[in-house]
Amino acid sequence: MPVILAIESSCDETSASVCINGKIVSNVIVNQTIHEKYGGVVPELASRAHLQNIVPVVDSALKTAKIKLTDVDAFAFTQSPGLIGALLVGAQFAKSLSLALDKHLIAVHHMQAHVLANLIPEDKPDFPFLCLTVSGGHTQIVLCEDYLKMKIIAQTLDDAAGEAFDKSAKLLGLPYPGGPLMDKYAQQGDEKKFIFPEPQIDGLDFSFSGLKTAILYFIQKNEKQNENFIKENLNDICASVQQRIVSILLNKLKKAAEQTGIKNICIAGGVSANSGLRKAFEETGKQLGWKTFIPAFEYCTDNAGMIAITAYYKYLAKDFAEPSISPSARAQWND
Ligand code: KG4
Ligand code: ZN
């Protein structure tokens, strides 16, 4: 019955979660609002905010789980990828606790954890499953053969899906992070009003940079004729852009499902919180006879619950880390 305390600090959320025997019993997330005024995450400010937040966040996760630090069997942390200064805060914290209390240390790959967020609820996908992982830094289709056996079968050639949302939103004058705002405005808009091009990329890989350029030209052209064009059409532009991002994602996912013959399909990562994607994903699944899985909202964007559930399976596999381990901004997982 392992008790695991996990910490996530790879970007701009400080989060801690307690997992008892494979069940997430607390998942505390503090968003850093300081970055809003800079239009993006400022790494140095993120590290400082993690330092300020980490003790109260961990305290709160322990309290909610009704356990003490000494009840913990293993301390887990996000080892990679992410902002190095931000990762260091969580890594040092977990390492210090593991050394001081003589408990196991578990290093978790953030992108693997996004995938395994789908194993948090009772109703879990059977292996093998495919997962479309869409976040601010990554866009991947992952073939997951077992708890810790995963292969990336598709990725983005340029921007990630979250970046496509955030950069489009920025062109429309919306603050950072624009993804959730685009989602909000899109809900009131007509997704067929404007047509944006779908990139023609062979194979399963994604590309979003052409879409960004198309939006830029579209705005420039229309603003020449009407300086209030964005304001007057914001909902419809957001709905049309969102529809295109979603169709790019789902067309590749359909292709991957067809090629692999796999019908257990998940989505994960920050962009899987997008209501347009969630709806279209479920509709596609119904049409094609997929069994579909989407994490609850709190496990889509960055959270320590997903780190804790991954650490739980690593604990069962006795996959522990040495205290000398360092975080890495870019390391890929070993499959
Ligand atoms: O997984 P995540 O929290 O952090 C990374 O690992 O990158 O993903 C953050 C990304 C951001 O680009 C954010 O705009 C996007 O997820 N995002 C959304 C929504 N919620 C978060 N994009 C579209 N619609 C949403 N509702
Ligand atoms: Zn993430």
Image (tube, helix red, strand yellow):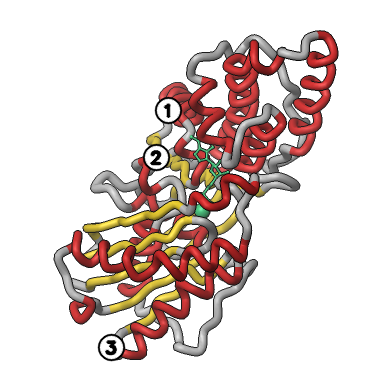
Question: Mark 2 belongs to which amino acid?
Answer: Ile
Label 3 sits on residue: 101
Q: Position of residue 233 (x, y in %)?
A: 64, 13
- In the image shown, does 260 or 187 lie closer to the viewer? 187
Q: CA distance from mark 1 to mark 3?
A: 45 Å
Q: Please, what secondary structure does the residue beneath circle 3 have? A: helix
Q: Residue at x 55, y 81 (%)?
A: 326
Numbered disc total: 3
Please tell me whether residue 213 is drawn above or below residue 19 in the rendered image: above
- CA gap between label 2 and label 1 equals 9 Å
Q: Earlier in the sequence, mark 2 or mark 1?
A: 1
Q: Is residue 260 visible?
A: yes
Q: Is residue 277 above or below residue 177?
A: above
Q: Residue type at mark 3? A: Leu
Q: What is the crowding at mark 3: few (fewer than 14 residues within 10 Å), some, or many (at least 20)?
A: some
Element under label 1?
helix
Label pair 1/3, CB-CB below 8 angstroms: no
Disc 3 versus disc 2: nearer the observer: 3
> Is the CB–ligand 1 distance for label 1 below 8 Å?
no
- Image quadrant holding the N terminus, namely bottom left
Instruction: Residue under label 1, please give it.
Output: 282
Distance from the alpha carbon under mark 3 to that under mark 2: 36 Å
> In the displayed structure, does residue 138 sit left or right of residue 69?
right
Q: Are marks 2 and 1 in contact (CB under 8 Å)?
A: yes
Image location (x, y in percent) of residue 295: 37, 43
Task: Name the image quarter holding the C terminus.
Answer: bottom right
Q: x%, y% of residue 140?
A: 60, 48
Q: Give the numbered dot on residue 139.
A: none
Dot placed on the residue nearer the N-terminal end, 3 or 2 = 3
In this view of the protein, which residue sits in the foreground, 181 or 1?
Answer: 181
